[in-house]
Image (cartoon, rainbow, N blue to C red):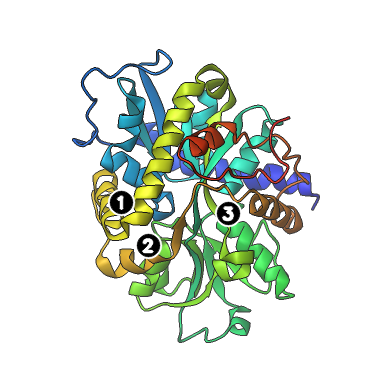
Amino acid sequence: MPANSALRRGFAVIAALPLLTLAACGYGSEAKDDDTAKVAAGAQKIDGLDSVKIGYFGNLTHGTALVAVNKGYFQKALGATEAKYQVFNAGPSEIEALNSGSIDIGWIGPSPAINGYTKSKGTNLRIIGGSASGGVKLVVNPKKIKSIKDVKGKKIATPQLGNTQDVAFLNWIADQGWKVDAESGKGDVSVVRTDNKVTPDAYKSGSIDGAWVPEPTASKLVAEGAKVLLDESDLWPDKKFVITNIIVSQKFLKEHPKAVEAVLKASVDTNKWINANSDAAKAAANAQLEVDSGKALKPEVIDPAWKSIQFTNDPLASTLNSEAEHAVKAGLLEDPLLKGIYDLTPLNNVLKGEGESPVDDAGLGVQ
């Protein structure tokens, strides 16, 4: 099948699925107010804005956002401009919210950012910073899969057709010399697209033999008896690859640059605090997950999951380009024109003010 046909059909499926689950609450659920996020006396509005709308996922790979919400970093940076939040289950719905103006800035994985940028012909978003690396594992039933060669012929879950983990797994399958039809998931390995929320139950029932998933889903499976067969970090140079980026609508970036820098300042400050206070940060992230979803993660899940994630301001731009190439190789994406997807000027302004080194866009920045 031609790549452009796969792109239209594959990502149409991705776009439809999360909207079914989120139809009752718009694009995503609103995070509850946090008592720690009080506005300081005498604070001023930034860029004259009443509010800035921030989106993120209830995943540990979005730990920067979780901690920043819980500890009030966003609100502190925005002064009298209110920080508002929406929590998403999937990237396509967050991209749609960004396009509609329901959010202004979002934490999101690389594949949805690439897809959103290319489908709009480079008109809707910019990646303005990094947030996290790592936190993705291939976990398997040790009774059925004892080595990599045993994955052939088995049923392995990924979160969604064409999402970041799905593309990574399809690329890994190809590297083993195995064949799989990207859209159907049928071939030498059965790729079963399964929402992260139900993947643990699918594993317990025996309907899947393993999963290539982000945290905390991977550690939830391990708590059910699965074993880690592969950490995706081991496949990348320096064991680093982008798993979460920060994006902004181009309109918002142009009209409200001070607000964008304020959110980035909050992100940089949060990452600094996370990396200096790992246990306290883990607790803050878990507390916010409980606020957003009604359920905190158990220690046997969050402890190993948190250790596998690196929080970084660097968007690791060269790895984004590699991930796009993997999607092309899988037949899920036409060769994308990514020039201009990054604008790291606001982030580098913040980093300069903090006395830190600038980050690089790998030649994919705005002219």
- Of residues 180 and 318, the one nearer the viewer is 318
* Residue at the image position 41 percent from the left and 77 percent from the top: 226
Determine crowd level at label 1: few under 14, some 14-19, many 20+ residues with C-alpha closer than 10 A.
many
Relative to residue 12, is residue 201 depicted above or below?
below
* Residue at the image position 27 percent from the left and 47 percent from the top: 288
Residue 140 showing in the rendered view: yes
Cα distance between the residues tagged 2 and 1: 10 Å
Contact between labelled residues 3 and 2, with CB atoms less than 8 Å apart: no
Q: Read off the residue under disc 3.
A: 164
Quick one: label 2 or label 3, which is nearer the N terminus?
A: 3
Q: Secondary structure at mark 2?
A: helix
Q: Read off the residue under disc 1.
A: 285
Quick one: label 3 or label 1, which is nearer the N terminus?
A: 3
Q: Is residue 264 left or right of residue 174?
A: left
Q: Residue lying furthest left in this view?
A: 35
- Of residues 45 and 221, the one nearer the viewer is 45
Q: Amino acid at mark 3?
A: Thr
Q: Tell me the quarter of the picture where residue 269 sits.
A: top left
Q: Read off the residue under disc 2.
A: 306
Q: Is residue 75 left or right of residue 196?
A: left
Contact between labelled residues 1 and 2, with CB atoms less than 8 Å apart: yes
Determine crowd level at label 2: few under 14, some 14-19, many 20+ residues with C-alpha closer than 10 A.
many
Q: Is residue 93 left or right of residue 37?
A: right
The numbered dot on residue 305 is none
